[in-house]
Amino acid sequence: MIRMFAILEDGAWHSLNEIAEELGVPIEKLAHYCENISKHQVIEYDVCSGKVRIGHKLMSMIMKLRADEEAEAEWERIGAGTAIIPPQKNFQIQGVTVQNMTEQDLKIEFTFNTKLKEIVISKA
């Protein structure tokens, strides 16, 4: 039934007949499924009209995920570099602190094409 969410992600009301036909499932099975998941506010289901649409909470989550994906897609710069980090020292790159938690100098070579989040180096 995950394919149903692809149909509903436009936020509009859709009839059970339309969805059942597109998914190739019996309308009775779809109606029962919609009744159950509407109790959890995943979708809104109007029993009288036989129409469903995606719930507000799920739509908000989808919109947030899309915004995050678009923000990552905008990050197209490729970074590269070499750093020698003394023992128990750190440095920052793109606002991320790289820490050498070992007892020896470390040489790291890096390339990246997404925004860094965290790098920690420690003795295994």
Image: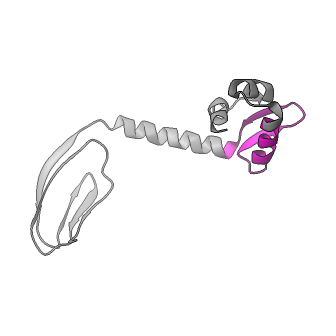
List the single residue furthest toward the bottom: 103
Residue 59 point in image, percent of width and height: 63, 40
Query: Could you tell me which residue is drawn at 71 percent across and 42 percent down?
Result: 55
Is residue 32 magenta-colored? yes
Query: Could you tell me which residue is drawn at 59 percent across and 45 percent down?
Result: 61
Left or right of 9 in this view: 100: left
Query: Could you tell me which residue is drawn at 63 percent across and 39 percent down?
Result: 2
Q: Give the answer, above or below, for where 66 lies relative to 10.
A: below
Q: Give the quarter of the figure containing the N terminus.
A: top right
Q: Nearer the viewer, residue 110 or 67?
A: 110
Q: Nearer the viewer, residue 123 or 20?
A: 20
Query: Could you tell me which residue is drawn at 64 percent across and 44 percent down?
Result: 58
Q: Give the answer, above or below, for where 117 lies relative to 32.
A: below
Left or right of 22 in this view: 65: left
Residue 76 point in image, percent of width and height: 30, 35
- Magenta-highlighted residues: 30-57
Left or right of 10 in this view: 116: left
The coloring applied to the image is one colour
Is residue 51 magenta-colored? yes
Residue 11 point in image, percent of width and height: 68, 32
Q: How many marks?
A: 0
Q: Give the quarter of the figure containing the C terminus.
A: bottom left
Residue 104 point in image, percent of width and height: 10, 72
List the single residue furthest toward the right: 48
